[in-house]
Amino acid sequence: MLLFAFHASTHMVAAGDTWVAMACGRHFSNHGVDTVEPFSFNSHPAGPSEETLEKHPNWTHGLIKKWHPTGWINQNWLTHLIFYKLANWFGDGDSYNYNTLVYWKFVLYGLAVFCVYAAGKLLGVGDILAATGACFAVYIGRTFYDIRPAGYSNLLAPVLILLLVLTVVKNYRLIWLVVPLIVFWANVHGGYLYASIMLVPFAGIHLLLRLPRRWTLCLGFVGLWLVLYLLSYKFIGNNYYLQVQKMLGNDVSAPTLFKDKTLII
């Protein structure tokens, strides 16, 4: 498994945002995390401005500035800072040691392949099959593995799945570990939204399983119907679908879910 993780990590870095991350990390290291974007002349100004705050009570101005700033909101600020610190700490004087970022990549995907393997083992999969699945997972994603913030999502997604499996098979209290995981994830990459997407069906399925069998089947079919209905609505309302229909000479328009504030079923 480690050989496959090593091979996956040897893909050449092709992401230009690696260097953007380094520049942002240097800015955060020197000036702190702020909302002033120093790299572009037409970025959103830092705020909120006094004019924007006028419509709110005076006592809320400080809270709004602290908890709802506007301007340059760098979702990946912590990854950028980590990249810069790694290259700077292990560098020599004014020169950066970029090899440390490569080592970061090796460690990241080594941990990722272990998490996939561990999740498979906890689910009752045999050693060989679990290892094969873990190796296959890192192998097929090799071309997407760059030194960039998305690497953390590639690791934290299997970590989340491992935590959910541990919650089910070991102790339900382990679900609370998801909280610090998401807090960290939200500061290193925007892929933390995956956690919210996964927790909804996880909680929903386990809620249904605790209900009487009759209610489980009833609510399960209702939920399945609703999902399929919304998916069909999304497909029919797709702009490409509408364009194809117009090319075929069909008079179609985008569907609507609501009419006169009433859900159309």
Image: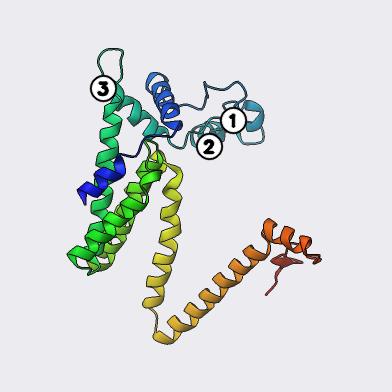
Q: CA distance from mark 2 to mark 3?
A: 33 Å
**Direction from residue 100 to residue 259 in the image, left or right:** right
Q: Is residue 23 above or below residue 236?
A: above
Residue drawn at x 40%, y 42% is 150
Q: Report the quarter where the C terminus lies.
A: bottom right
The numbered mark at residue 48 is: 1
Residue drawn at x 40%, y 26% is 22
User: In this rendering, which labeled residue sits more in front, label 3 or label 1?
Assistant: 3
Q: Is residue 5 above or below residue 50?
A: below
Which quadrant of the structure image shows residue 80?
Answer: top left
Mark toward the start of the polypeptide (3 vs 1): 1
The total number of labels drawn is 3
The numbered mark at residue 68 is: 2
Residue drawn at x 50%, y 80% is 221
Amino acid tagged 3: Trp
The numbered mark at residue 89 is: 3
**Direction from residue 77 to residue 116 in the image, left or right:** left
- Is residue 183 visible in the rendered image? The answer is no
**Direction from residue 106 to residue 182 in the image, left or right:** right
Amino acid tagged 2: His
Residue 157, x across and y down, in percent:
36, 52
Residue 100, x across and y down, in percent:
26, 29
Q: For mark 1, give the secondary structure.
A: loop
Q: CA distance from mark 2 to mark 1?
A: 8 Å
Q: Is residue 54 above or below residue 143?
A: above
